Image (spheres, helix red, strand yellow):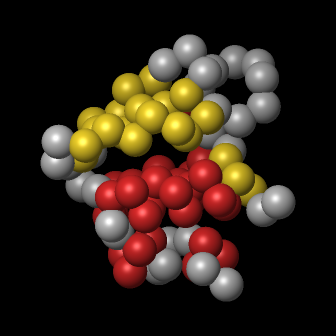
């Protein structure tokens, strides 16, 4: 499975979901945008829980992108989401 680095993930979020609220939970990151909340984005490997260390599989990030309907925007910063 392909991983998406935290740096590229946060860059995509800023570009595609500019007003999104990010909430760090114990094992997941919740993303809120326009009245919807995506709760299924896990942190990366166990260890220190730091937002900039999120590393998720491309399929999980693709799920977030589909949930918010920003597929066209997400292709620019993370092209491997849709090979």
Q: Residue at x 67, y 84 (%)?
A: 83
Query: Which of 7/19 is in front?
Result: 19
> Above or below — where is 27 with respect to 14?
above
Query: Which of 60/76 is in front?
Result: 60
Q: Looking at the image, can residue 52 be seen?
A: no
Number of labels in the image equals 0
Left or right, 65 with reference to 70:
right
Query: Which of 38/15 is in front?
Result: 38
Q: Residue at x 34, y 69 (%)?
A: 70
User: Could you say where residue 56 lies in the image, as x and y percent from the top left?
Assistant: 67, 47
User: Could you say where residue 4 lies in the image, as x and y percent from the top left?
Assistant: 67, 57
User: Could you say where residue 78 lies in the image, as x and y percent from the top left?
Assistant: 56, 71
Q: Looking at the image, can residue 26 be seen?
A: yes
State which quadrant residue 18 falls in.
bottom left
Query: Which of 7/69 is in front?
Result: 69
User: Could you say where residue 69 lies in the image, as x and y percent from the top left?
Assistant: 33, 67
Q: State the quadrant of the N terminus.
A: bottom right
Q: Residue at x 38, y 26 (%)?
A: 23
State which quadrant residue 73 falls in.
bottom left
> Above or below — where is 59 with respect to 75?
above
> Outermost residue, bottom direction?
83
Left or right, 72 with reference to 8:
left
């Amino acid at each position: 499975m392909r991983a998406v680095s935290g740096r590229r993930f946060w860059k995509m979020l800023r570009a595609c979901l500019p007003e999104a609220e990010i909430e760090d939970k114990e094992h997941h990151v919740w993303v809120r945008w326009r009245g919807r909340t995506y709760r299924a984005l896990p942190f990366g490997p166990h260890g220190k829980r730091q937002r900039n260390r999120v590393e998720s599989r491309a399929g999980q990030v693709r799920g977030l992108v589909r949930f918010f309907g920003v597929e066209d925007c997400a292709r620019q910063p993370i092209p491997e989401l849709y090979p």
